[in-house]
Amino acid sequence: MKNTFDPFAPEIIANPYPALERLRAVEPVSWNEPLRGWLLTAYDDVKAAQKDRRFSAERVKPFTSHMAATERPELERMGTLLNQWLLFRDPPAHTPLRRLLIDTFTPRAINALRPRIGEIVTELLSPLSARDQFDMIGDFAFPMPATVIAHILGVPSSDVPKFRSWSNDLATVIGNSRQVPDRFERGARALFTLTDYFRSTVLQRSNERKKGALVDDLISAREAGGPMSEEELVASCILILFAGHETTMNLIGNATLLLLKHRNQLALLRDDPNLVSSMVEEVLRYECAAFVIVRIADEDIEIGEKTIAKGDRVFLMLGAANRDPMHFDNPESFDIRRNPNRHLSFGYGIHFCIGAQLARVEAEVAFEYLLPLIGDIEPVSEDLDWDDNFVLRGVKSLLLRRPAVAAA
């Protein structure tokens, strides 16, 4: 069939779901020429691929090898640093590194952070309540989770503004952005800067023998002979900082957009704030902040009468799987009371998102405080500037205003 999904076309960036629906119905395993890889769009295929060890998470290695062959030392170095990320590692290297991190993100540990998250939310929302117009992304959805993750890691909240530009530049590489022509150079500079930042942080906290933050626990584990090298420790800090706020930022932004677009659902939530947890799950399903998981085939693999060749890239389309009618009733309907809601937005299997509970709690606490604020606001424009980042889905900004200002 003719390829109906160009991930870099403006209309697809704005709304990819109709094209993905057609693919899932007609050709759920399809070759995508713009991406030079395979798309899996059916729920069962996307879920199964995440447990299939023939699909490797080490998708940065081919890039690193290519950069070495083309004599691009700065990009080869970027690839080498990214290869240290837990996100891009397979077992057996993946297993002990994940075990070191997972205790920090248990439901019990995250729920203990609720009071601090509430304080951060209050501090950020307080000045916004008196303003006639503000940017939900820049003024709240970014700094809130970034401040939380800085608190967890043990870095100063005063450094949060720096993280925005570094993360934005790094995201253009991680997400395969095509609207930023120098994305590799910008991403490399951001990664090198973050590496220097966390090397300094590790050295300082190690010398001062500080305790209580995640970076301190990782330092102690390494000094006790644990499996994490200094390079892996630094890489883990960068990954946690990056992944710990980028997806939650988009989750909050996407939730705000959906509630303002579906006023009946916003009314349900305001009438029964206990629905906030269910609302968060439905946002994750309907407009998932992590839109795609990328894998590399380690051998020839047959799925749905198609042969995926060894070395091919495979894009597991979470956004399509989460709207598969074989698993969700009325999947194109945004329903905050949906139950059950077994979406795949946090992944599945050994790479299930470590920070899933943190993202959920942050969004729940955020909307407990946001509900009184967003009931009487509206977007400044219906033309939304969706980021062309293929992996992470969200808007670059979301200007909101009170209707009285619009009528003035």
Image (spheres, rainbow, N blue to C red):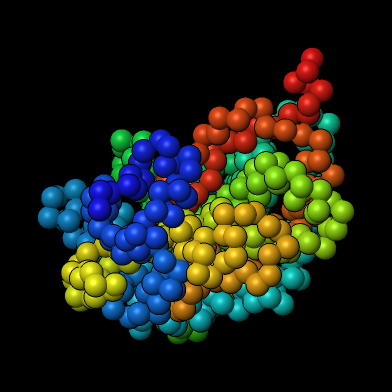
* Picture mark count: 0
Residue sitting at 17 percent across and 56 percent down? 66
- In this rendering, position of residue 268 left or right of residue 17: right
Asked if 326 appears above or below 146 in the picture, the reply is below
Residue at 40% x, 77% y is 48
Kindly tell me whether residue 210 is visible in this rendering. no
Q: Quadrant of residue 43?
A: bottom left
Residue 119 in the image, given as x and y percentages of width and height: 80, 54
Query: In front here: 395 or 44?
Result: 44
Left or right, 310 with respect to 377, comes to: left
Q: Residue furthest top?
A: 408
| Image height of 36 relative to 165, above or below | below
Residue farthest right in this picture: 271
Which residue does the image show at 48% across and 39% down from the upper left?
14
Is 161 placed left or right of 308 in the picture? right
Residue 107 or residue 70, whichever sits in front: 107
Indicate whether 5 appears above or below 31: above
Q: Residue at x 41, y 66 (%)?
A: 42
Rendered position, 164 above or below 41 = above
Image position, residue 52 (x, y; %): 35, 80
Q: Which quarter of the rendered picture does the C terminus lie within?
A: top right
Which of 167/41 is in front?
41
Residue 69 seen anywhere in this rendered image of the structure: yes
Residue 20, percent from left and from top = 41, 53
